[in-house]
Amino acid sequence: MTSPRFKNNNRSLFVLLLAFILAGCASTATEPVDESVEPPSEMGDRAPQPIAPPQEFEAFDPDLNPYVPGTTRLLPRTFYFEFDRAVVGPDDLASLEMHATVLRNNRDRSVVIEGHCDERGTREYNLALGERRADAIRSYLTSAGVSPRQIETVSYGEERPEDPGNGEASWARNRRAVLIYR
């Protein structure tokens, strides 16, 4: 008579041996596959369509205006400021990040950042404020990984208004920084 412990061990050994046998018998061979291909004339509407290669987008239009990466939409190049301020607005950060991406991916390109002001204030004050606005944009781009050698700044103060009119609407359009690609 066999002990119950020996019976349990035999069962375990039997199950384990059976698992090894079944695993060892698993066939890695595959059945031959019919690789004959029907000629296109016999396939009718089932002819495979060629897969178009991914479209490569240009980084710039003919006038050197940058596109939003991966699209044919132009990036906005003008950034507006509050009265007497040189702080980049939170709404402009996404566009500036795309400009940084374009410049990082095109190290042979550079940008001139023009700082502008409205007509209020002295000529000297407006030149300094325009410079601070251009520097604010430059600071963002360099912190986003753009080489400082790719960036030049210039201040025009009130000298080149976008809107020559008087009043808050005109002044708001003149308080800006503009990126010019080269």
Image (cartoon, rainbow, N blue to C red):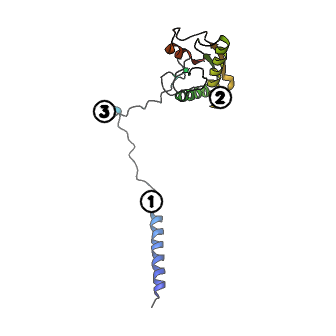
| Residue 3 percent location from the top left of the image | 47, 88
Looking at the rendered structure, the kind of residue marked 3 is Asp
Q: Is residue 91 above or below residue 130?
A: below
- Badge 3 local density, few (<14 within 10 Å), some, or many (20+)? few
Secondary structure under tag 2 reads helix
Residue at 59% from the left image edge and 13% from the top image edge: 120
Q: Earlier in the sequence, mark 1 or mark 3?
A: 1
| Residue 3 appears left or right of 108 | left
Q: Quadrant of the N terminus?
A: bottom left
State the image coordinates of residue 122 (x, y, percent, origin top left): 65, 12
Q: Earlier in the sequence, mark 2 or mark 3?
A: 3
* Of the image marks 1 and 2, the number of the one nearer the N terminus: 1
Query: Do we see residue 167 in this rendering?
Result: yes
Checking the image for residue 156, the label placed there is none
Residue 101 versus residue 13 in the image, above or below = above
Report the amino acid beneath label 2.
Thr
**Disc assigned to residue 45:** 3
Between disc 1 and disc 2, the foreground one is: 2
Q: Disc 2 to disc 3, how far (Cα)?
A: 55 Å
Looking at the rendered structure, the kind of residue marked 1 is Ser
Front residue of 39/159: it is 159
**Residue carrying label 1:** 27
Horizontal relation, residue 93 to residue 148: left or right: left
Helix, strand or loop status at disc 1: loop
Task: Name the side, left or right, on which 60 lies relative to 112.
Answer: left
Q: Position of residue 127 (x, y in %)?
A: 66, 14
